[in-house]
Image (cartoon, rainbow, N blue to C red):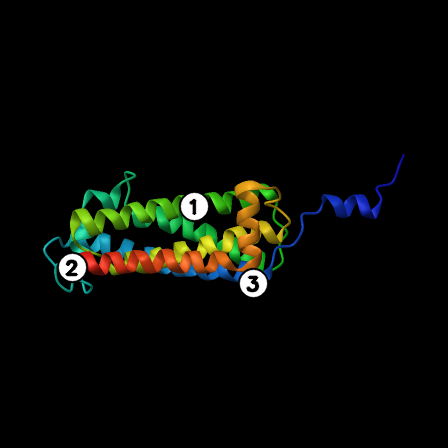
Amino acid sequence: MSAIQPADRAADVPPAVPRGAAWILLVAGAMGVFGTFVQTLEKIRILERPGEALWCDRGSALSCTSVLKAWQSSALGVPNSMVGLVVFGFFLTAGVALVLRSRPSVAFLGVVQFFALFMLGFTLWYLWQTTFVLGSLCVYCILNGTAVVVANLAAPRLLVGAGRLQGDGVVGFVRRAVQDGVDAWFWLALWAGVAVTMWAVLS
């Protein structure tokens, strides 16, 4: 009977991820949980008292009520805030576990990256709808959208820090961008562009 050598056991243990990226994911999850939780409460309040305005109604351009009543706010069959609450809750839980030095599998990090990109695409679509179709904006959308961008800043850093995203082409470009910190400027420019566009259309 052969004994398992320490080197063999170490090879089977997933590497630790950068703690800074774990903190970023934790912050993104906390922001998103707070925003979607309050938004869910406001959605319930609208259903209970449909004629009552919400505190964040500040005119036609900034109107939580008109946005939360629109079909776009339940595009997946349930209120978007409930979907976000689940996903951001996952980010928060994952962030806490990673900050505490859990060693995630590649599949786990892939799930984090998948949901970060899914939420990004959904958020951009939703903001497009509220800006150009509904002509109003919900303050919770800004908070939740910021949390999504922060999550997308963290997810590839977790993968790169764990020794993943190896290769050439697009994967290599993303890895180098993360390692050089260039991706942070991309996310900042993206969110600034979204903000400027919404301001220009709704002002």
**What mark, if any, has residue 61 been given in the picture?**
2
Can you see residue 137?
yes
Residue at (25% x, 56% y) in the render: 197
Give the x, y percent position of residue 198.
Answer: 24, 57
Task: Choose the circle earlier in sequence order: 1 or 3.
Answer: 3
Residue at (33% x, 55% y) in the render: 36
- Residue lying furthest right in this view? 1
**What mark, if any, has residue 117 been given in the picture?**
1
Residue behind mark 3: 20
Residue at (38% x, 47% y) in the render: 119
Nearer to me, 4 or 186:
186
Amino acid on which disc 3 is placed: Gly
Q: In what element is the residue under mark 2?
A: loop
Amino acid on which disc 1 is placed: Leu
Can you see residue 37?
no
Q: Find the distance from the CA under tag 2 to the CA under tag 1.
A: 28 Å
Q: Find the distance from the CA under tag 3 to the CA under tag 2.
A: 37 Å
